[in-house]
Image: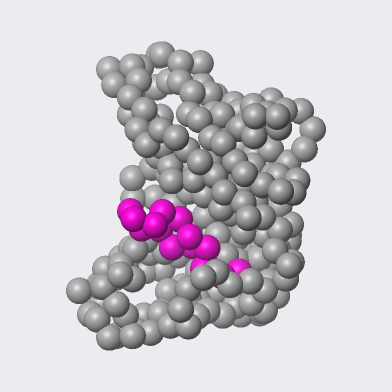
């Protein structure tokens, strides 16, 4: 069974631009979560989707948004990029709602210049 | 609120020696605990999980962890490390959210460096 796939692996953007990251979960997994990883703040929860609905959101500004499609694939978007948005963005999927282990992709490394 | 503390940011150890990576958690409700490993330029890989039952949990690659409720700890151990175990290790506690689903709160990570 294929794992969680994130595209692209690397991205370089300029301040003020916007970016869209993509995540394909493990087949059969309906919950998709997004995390931001930075050296300073560590791993922080962005949001979680289940059946095309955002159920939970972390403490991030509205510039960060996402969506989930009917095939469970998910995208996250960051608008008006800032230098501090440079990070590794990790997507994770799980089989069902509560306490199923999260399976992570290899992430998208975003660099904002 | 839930939190996770990994006291050691770096742990150097010689190959074939035993290792323990420490994790303490804070939670006001039942906890579900996880250890993940991250190799350079990769995502997180699940090592093991504690959901309920036996407090000694065995995971992949020879790792195990013991859940200690009285000490609120979930330390990760391996009796004999290999050079390929060099990576960053994250302890995490699962938090069930009001909207359903759960999120992980991670510790700051411990860099395990195995030396020859």
Q: Is residue B1 visible?
A: yes
Q: Main secondary structure of the magenta part?
A: strand
Residue A86's quadrant in the figure?
bottom left
Residue A54's quadrant in the figure?
bottom right
Q: Nearer the viewer, residue B61 or B10?
A: B10
The residue under the point 65% across, 29% down is B71
Q: How many dots with numbers?
A: 0
Measured from the top left, where is residue B13 in percent x and y?
35, 20
- Up the image or down, A30 lies above or below B11; here it is below
Residue B110's quadrant in the figure?
top left
Which residue is the extreme one toward the left? A113
Measured from the top left, where is residue B22 in percent x and y?
50, 30
Q: Which residues are magenta?
A: A35-49
- Is B95 a magenta residue? no
The residue under the point 44% across, 52% down is B43
- Is A38 a magenta residue? yes
């Amino acid at each position: 069974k294929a794992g969680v796939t994130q595209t692209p692996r690397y991205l370089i953007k300029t301040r003020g631009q916007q970016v869209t990251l993509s995540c394909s979960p493990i087949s059969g997994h309906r919950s998709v979560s997004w995390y931001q990883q930075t050296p300073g703040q560590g791993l922080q929860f962005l949001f979680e989707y289940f059946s095309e609905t955002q159920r939970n959101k972390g403490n991030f500004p509205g510039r960060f948004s996402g969506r989930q499609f009917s095939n469970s694939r998910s995208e996250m978007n960051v608008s008006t990029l800032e230098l501090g948005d440079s990070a590794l963005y990790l997507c994770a999927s799980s089989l069902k709602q509560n306490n199923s282990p999260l399976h992570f992709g290899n992430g998208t490394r975003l660099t904002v210049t | 609120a839930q939190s996770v503390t990994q006291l050691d940011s770096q742990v150097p150890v010689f190959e074939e020696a035993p290792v323990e990576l420490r994790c303490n958690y804070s939670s006001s409700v039942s906890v579900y605990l996880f250890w993940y490993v991250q190799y350079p330029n990769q995502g997180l890989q699940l090592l093991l999980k504690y959901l309920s039952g036996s407090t000694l949990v065995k995971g992949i690659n020879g790792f195990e962890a013991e859940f200690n409720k009285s000490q609120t700890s979930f330390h990760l151990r391996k009796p004999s490390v290999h050079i390929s175990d060099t990576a960053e290790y994250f302890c995490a506690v699962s938090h069930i959210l009001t909207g359903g689903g759960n999120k992980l709160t991670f510790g700051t990570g411990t860099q395990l460096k195995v030396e020859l």
